[in-house]
Amino acid sequence: MKTYEGGRHLEGATVTVDGRTLDPRFDLATFSRAGFEWTYEGDGPRQLALALLADHLGDGGKALDRCDQFMIDVVANLDNYWRLTSSDIDRALGDASPD
């Protein structure tokens, strides 16, 4: 299970996956060259949603298809400092397997 973490610091916003910097996936789409953002709906949060889903799903096409709704449902509602696990993302996408 992967762990994604984000926070705002003096040097700017940072997002990691298992302690490594999360790839913004500009190769799939560039919504915001300014980097990741969250707590609202917009280009920076859309870039974060795409990057999170591309890493989590391992499929750029599926990530692009689902990033707008994921941005609205999840990324726009994150706090200044946050943590999401693979299970959290699966639940948000409705992909969680029943226990």
Image: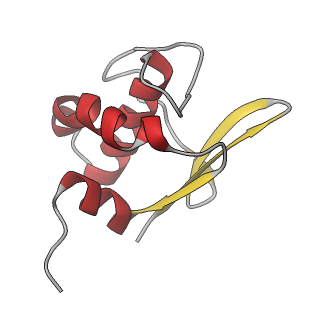
Q: Residue at x 53, y 42 (%)?
A: 22
Q: Is residue 47 above or below residue 49?
A: above
- The percent position of residue 60, horizontal first and vertical second, equals 24, 35
74 left or right of 13 in image? left
Q: Which one is nearer the viewer's eye here, 70 or 18?
A: 70
Q: Which one is nearer the viewer's eye here, 25 or 74?
A: 74
Q: Residue at x 21, y 52 (%)?
A: 93
Quadrant containing the N terminus is bottom left
- The percent position of residue 47, horizontal first and vertical second, equals 43, 26
21 left or right of 12 in image? left
- Where on the picture, by quarter, is residue 90? bottom left
Quadrant containing the C terminus is bottom left
The colour mode here is secondary structure
- The percent position of residue 71, horizontal first and vertical second, equals 35, 34
Counting labels gives: 0
Q: Residue at x 27, y 33 (%)?
A: 67
Q: Residue furthest right?
A: 10
- The percent position of residue 12, horizontal first and vertical second, equals 75, 29
Q: Residue at x 38, y 35 (%)?
A: 49
94 left or right of 72 in image? left
Q: Is residue 42 above or below residue 68?
A: above
